[in-house]
């Protein structure tokens, strides 16, 4: 599940970078460049890179509390018990299945544009291929293939991005084309891009950092002395490659290119196939297949113990709740492999529906956003209770859906209430980010100032940006409910020193 917690700096950084450069990084970065113009790729790549960086300060605490853990869920089980752990596990299972769907969808789009094969054929080929080698050796296979894939990603990206750029006319054509786009698309500080794209992705930074098991699994796998350089290197590598890929979407915008069949997922394959010779098209095919494979195999491993998805099912569901700490390692392995097969089938089925990638990403981000404060607070504060954790996440998800899908009108008193909750959420995000690097006092001050600033400047305006409002509301609601219920509880304070004894290696029973 975690390679004995001894993955070195080189392998760890390569695996983290390759895993995070998934199919959505390609397609969404280009979509944002095409939709929002100059600032689009910057917003997607920069905030996506920060999702890797911000696990680092909290990750040190996770490793200190549970040095032998395989998943974050195991730590939460030792802290609270089954209900809170299962909520975290469910969110990761759902997120990993959606991630599989996104990657297989990208594979289908790639195959359908660049070959005579159908979309569904591409989806099946990607699913079966990734499943085959991940079943072989789980997380080890994921890390080893990640290293090879990153080498290919970097080498090919260095060639592909400039090739497309100059084949489309180069810098002069880009500058000339900016005259034909809207003022907002030509503005590097576009408010439209910030409020509709940059801010929602900024809000998702902590959500993905804490909620995504593919990241936390590598946190527990990397040698503890190498955590900091591993995550800093991965942050820089991801940002550089993805921002470059997003520029292809910007070039398509300036040239007035229309996405094939109106599907934004076809934009990058369409640009490559139209402007590059067959050799470069073949290189691009390898590039995308490598990116989606590196993430898909990580999702599969996370769910059983072989990577991310398998690790969740093996450790969180079977190990802690079915076997109740007396797990048979061989049976765990079987559970993990069965999980991979079932997850692959589900990913292929959902991918065949060609659902909107961005809608899926936003929903998962909100789901993980609801757990951010309860998870972090549970690892630093001894007063957080299991009931407060569980209730805050469930209430936050309901309130998020009310705002995101406008189950209640976002106007008048109800709109004001959502904006106040969102203001609390904004303060929580800034506060936690500052707290992670500068400490509790600085985090509290920054959080309060950010919340007050949002109350002053966002009231009456934020309701016009539903995605941002709903995501911030998830943070604010979960924090408010968690704090109030924990302060009202009379349960004794938790002893953090007991966590290490509750989280151990499952293979000890074999020796």
Image: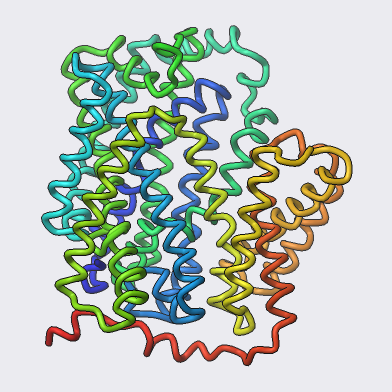
Query: Within the image, what quadrant is residue 196 found in?
Result: top right
Q: Residue at x 43, y 42 (%)?
A: 239
Q: Is residue 429 left or right of residue 281?
A: right
Residue 446 in picture, x, y percent from top left = 72, 62
Query: Within the image, what quadrant is residue 500 found in?
Result: bottom left
Q: Residue at x 73, y 80 (%)?
A: 487
Name the one closer to the observer, 320 or 190: 320
Q: Residue at x 18, y 66 (%)?
A: 333
Assign the C terminus to one quadrant of the image: bottom left
Q: Residue at x 26, y 45 (%)?
A: 344
Residue 122 in picture, x, y percent from top left = 23, 27
Residue 40 in picture, x, y percent from top left = 54, 29
How is colour applied across the structure in the image?
Answer: rainbow
Residue 92 in picture, x, y percent from top left = 42, 57
How many numbered callouts? Answer: 0
Q: Is residue 300 left or right of residue 477?
A: left
Name the one closer to the observer, 243 or 502: 502
Assign the N terminus to one quadrant of the image: bottom left
**Is residue 507 depicted above or below 490 in this figure?**
above
Q: Residue furthest front?
A: 322
**Is residue 459 depicted above or below 157 in this figure?**
below
**Is residue 404 depicted above or below 475 in this figure?**
above
Q: Is residue 122 left or right of residue 355?
A: left
């Amino acid at each position: 599940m975690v390679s004995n917690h001894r993955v070195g700096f080189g392998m760890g950084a390569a695996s983290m970078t390759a895993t995070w450069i998934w199919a959505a990084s390609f397609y969404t970065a280009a979509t944002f460049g095409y939709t929002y113009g100059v600032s689009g790729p910057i917003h997607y790549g920069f905030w996506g890179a920060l999702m890797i960086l911000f696990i680092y300060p909290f990750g040190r605490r996770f490793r200190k509390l549970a040095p032998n853990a395989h998943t974050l869920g195991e730590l939460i089980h030792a802290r609270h018990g089954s209900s809170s752990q299962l909520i975290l596990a469910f969110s990761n299972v759902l997120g990993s299945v959606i991630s599989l769907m996104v990657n297989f969808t990208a594979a289908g789009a790639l195959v359908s544009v660049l070959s005579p094969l159908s979309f569904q054929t591409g989806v099946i080929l990607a699913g079966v291929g990734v499943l085959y080698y991940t079943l072989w050796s789980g997380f080890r296979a994921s890390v080893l293939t990640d290293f090879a894939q990153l080498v290919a990603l970097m080498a090919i990206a260095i060639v592909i991005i400039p090739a497309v750029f100059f084949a489309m006319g180069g810098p002069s054509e880009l500058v000339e084309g900016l005259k034909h786009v809207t003022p907002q698309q030509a503005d590097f500080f576009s408010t439209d891009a910030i409020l509709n794209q940059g801010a929602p992705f900024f809000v998702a930074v902590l959500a993905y950092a804490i909620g995504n098991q593919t990241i936390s699994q590598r946190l527990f796998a990397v040698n503890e002395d190498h955590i900091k350089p591993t995550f800093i290197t991965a942050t820089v590598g991801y940002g550089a490659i993805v921002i470059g890929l997003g520029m292809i979407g910007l070039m398509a915008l300036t040239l007035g290119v229309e996405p094939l069949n109106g599907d934004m997922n076809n934009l990058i394959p369409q640009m490559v196939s139209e402007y590059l010779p067959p050799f470069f098209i073949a290189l691009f095919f390898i590039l995308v297949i490598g990116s989606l494979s590196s993430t898909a195999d990580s999702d599969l491993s996370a769910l059983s113990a072989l990577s991310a998805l398998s690790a969740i099912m093996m450790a969180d569901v079977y190990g802690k709740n079915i076997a109740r700490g007396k797990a048979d390692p061989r049976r765990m392995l079987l559970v993990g492999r069965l999980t991979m097969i079932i997850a692959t089938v589900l990913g292929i089925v959902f991918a065949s529906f060609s659902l909107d990638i961005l809608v899926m990403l936003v929903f998962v981000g909100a789901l993980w956003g609801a757990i951010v404060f309860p998870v972090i607070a549970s690892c630093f504060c001894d007063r957080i209770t299991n009931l407060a954790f569980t209730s805050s996440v469930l209430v936050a998800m309901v309130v998020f859906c009310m705002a995101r899908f406008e189950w209640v009108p976002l106007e008048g008193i109800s709109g004001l209430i959502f904006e106040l909750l969102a203001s609390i959420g904004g303060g929580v995000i800034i506060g936690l980010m500052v707290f992670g690097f500068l400490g509790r006092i600085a985090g509290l001050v920054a959080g309060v100032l950010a919340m007050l600033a949002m109350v002053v400047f966002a009231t009456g305006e934020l309701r016009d940006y539903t995605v941002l409002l709903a995501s911030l509301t998830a943070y604010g609601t979960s924090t408010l409910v968690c704090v109030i219920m924990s302060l009202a509880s009379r349960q004794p304070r938790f002893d953090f020193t007991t966590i290490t004894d509750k989280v151990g290696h499952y293979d000890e029973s074999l020796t």
